[in-house]
Image: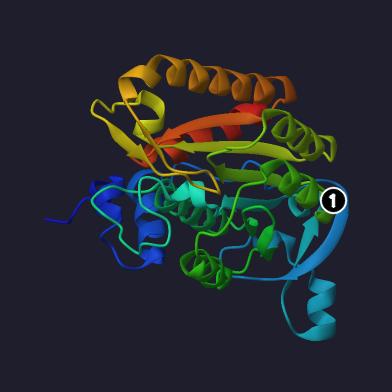
Amino acid sequence: MTSDPRKYLDPKLLSRISRLEMKARLIVEGFISGLHKSPYHGFSVEFAEHREYVPGDDIRHIDWKVFGRSDRFYIKQYEEETNLRSYILLDVSQSMAYPHAPGSGKEGDRVSKYEYGTFVAAGLCYLLLRQQDAVGLTLFDDRVRTFVAPSSSPSHLGALLGEIEKSPLREKTDVGSIFHEVADRIKKKGLILIVSDLFDDIARLKRGLKHLRHKGHDVIVFHVLDEDELTFPFQRMTLFEGLEGFPELLANPQSLRAAYLEEITSFLAEVRKICRDLRVDYVQLNTASPLDVALTAYLAKRAGTLRT
């Protein structure tokens, strides 16, 4: 009997698979293969450019005049088809290491926010390239560490996943300034997919997202959080290790729990309100949840955005 790929959607199981490309394929094919055809693709009246024919293209759009001159097949692309560029922004700051100690090299039994984020980013890369969208990648902490320009070539997947796999966790987060830089750097309107814990000053975060929207980009935020951050389950005296420059703190968690939960609830409410006000799609992700939740939410948000 054929094995069901959906069993690999559990993040703990995925973490045991060695190659990120295999993980990406299983994420996509295991749950949503065949469910989605890019709603951005299509042919409108305004001609934009040519691209070389690849198997599967509609032969009705072959430019036979160009074939007569070059003896090669080219497809006419129109403005609607060439407008979409997708950019995945993946947070590689130290706070994404939780619950692992940064720099320890030990993965432990639990999936970190960063590992979960790489699964999400890899699945999105695979999905978007499969539907022939152009995909780019930005890895960031307090500055842009890697910027890969978008391409729709199938071979581009290896380059994207290679950058994700080799990237170490680095410094503090400066999400707001990164969004400003990306907004200035990307000249054509596109789809921006952000994978981050968003731990930054809320005002800077808002200004950065506002800048992306002002440039006309569609934005989807995948807000990656650990179960501990959402529920604060600690009971005994605990040494909390500081990340991104914060010191260690030995404390009785029971004395902190109410204040912490109030703070995180307020933070999440503010982030949701900012996204709602700016018409940014928001998807909260818990690293304990199966990955199909992430990509299903992505598809629903994208389809819903187009219907509005």
User: Residue at 30% of width from left, 54% of height from top?
Assistant: 14
Residue 73 in the figure: left or right of residue 223: right
Percent coordinates x, y for residue 179 in the rendering: 73, 45
Residue pointed to by mark 1: 184
Percent coordinates x, y for residue 217 in the rendering: 76, 40
Query: Looking at this view, is 78 or 111 the one in front?
Result: 111
Which secondary structure lies at badge 1?
Answer: helix
Percent coordinates x, y for residue 174 in the rendering: 67, 46
**Residue extending furthest left?**
1
Quadrant in which the N terminus is drawn: bottom left
Q: Is residue 43 visible in this depiction of the protein?
A: no
Q: Residues within 10 Å of mark 1 (few under 14, many from 20)?
A: few
Quadrant in which the C terminus is drawn: top right
Percent coordinates x, y for residue 237 in the rendering: 27, 30
In the rendered view, tell whether residue 196 sits above or below residue 17. above
Q: Is residue 34 visible in this depiction of the protein?
A: yes
Residue 67 in the figure: left or right of residue 40: right
**Residue extending furthest front?**
250
Query: Looking at this view, is 232 or 121 the one in front?
Result: 232
The number of numbered discs placed on residues in the rendered structure image is 1
In the rendered view, tell whether residue 262 sits above or below residue 299. above
Residue 251, located in which quarter of the rendered image? Answer: top left
User: Residue at 24% of width from left, 52% of height from top?
Assistant: 13
User: Residue at 56% of width from left, 63% of height from top?
Assistant: 56
Residue 144 in the figure: left or right of residue 110: right
Amino acid type for the residue under numbered disc 1: Asp
Residue 196, located in which quarter of the rendered image? Answer: top right
Q: How is the image coloured?
A: rainbow
